[in-house]
Amino acid sequence: LTEVPDWFCCGATPAHNVDELLSNIERAINKDSRPVFSRDKSVTGDPPSSSTGWPSEPWAELIRPVVASDEPSLIFCPDGDRMAVARAIHRLGSRKRSPFAVLDCAALPEPILEVEMLGCVKGAVSGVPDSRAGALEIANGGTLLVDEITWMPHRLQKAFLRIVRHKALRRLGGVEDILFDVRVLATTNLDPDKLLSDHSIVPEFRAFFSSNVVRIPAA
């Protein structure tokens, strides 16, 4: 079995966890075992748009090259609404009619983040009573946003890259490979040029996003 912390199983939250984390955990352990990530097909909450459908935000022109691509993209936004930028890229891109899922790396400890990324089969994870799909599987055909990517542990960064490149995953405890295809977006509030020097991400991860980096100026 994959073990998760006692406070996750029983619903008690350590003092250092914020209200948002508590809300996420409560959703994760409720009776229908919903994943702790957004998985909208309609993608609500888009930024204001002009009459042509293009966002009217100051960063709108900066995302044009990324919208036209289907390659992995890293959104650097030191402040402001990174989520709005990512949703706009999805909504305006070729995958707009497919799911948009968000994996929040900052909200969850490593064991739970792995479950949310890959999913699990029934009985494989303590505290998760039923089989469940992970973010990669839910986002199939659409876009997966990895929010606050530098919070993802290096072990999971390497596993994520391997899985995405092979376009096949195996739920925790499972024996069957599940094929999927997603576009990966990621966000960070740290300077992309310093992510390697401060060891926030592994070199392979930085190379994965090398083709498309969107730099949103500070407000």
Image: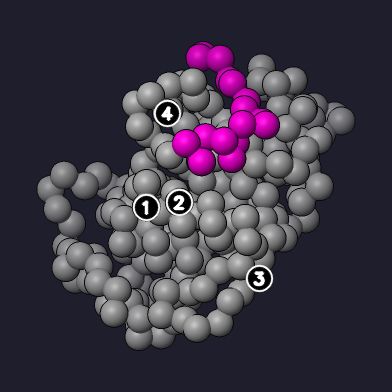
Q: Secondary structure at mark 3?
A: strand
- The residue that label 1 is drawn on is 155
- The residue that label 4 is drawn on is 196
Residue at x-position 29% and y-position 79%: 1
Q: What is the x, y in percent for residue 3?
A: 25, 72
Q: Residues within 10 Å of mark 2 (few under 14, many from 20)?
A: some
Amino acid type at circle 2 is: Lys
Q: What is the x, y in percent for residue 150?
A: 40, 37
Occupied quadrant, residue 139 = bottom right
- How has the structure been colored for display? one colour
Q: Secondary structure at mark 2?
A: helix
Q: Which residues are magenta?
A: 203-219
Q: Earlier in the sequence, mark 1 or mark 3?
A: 1
Amino acid type at circle 3 is: Leu
Q: Tell me if label 1 and label 3 are in contact, CB under 8 Å.
A: no
Amino acid type at circle 4 is: Leu
Amino acid type at circle 1 is: Arg
Q: Which mark is residue 158?
A: 2
Looking at the rendered image, the disc whose residue lies closer to the viewer, 4 or 3, is 4
Q: Is residue 138 left or right of residue 67?
A: left
- The residue that label 3 is drawn on is 179
Looking at the rendered image, the disc whose residue lies closer to the viewer, 2 or 3, is 2
Residue at x-position 59% and y-position 40%: 208
Closer to the camera in the image, 50 or 136: 136
Q: Residues within 10 Å of mark 3 (few under 14, many from 20)?
A: some
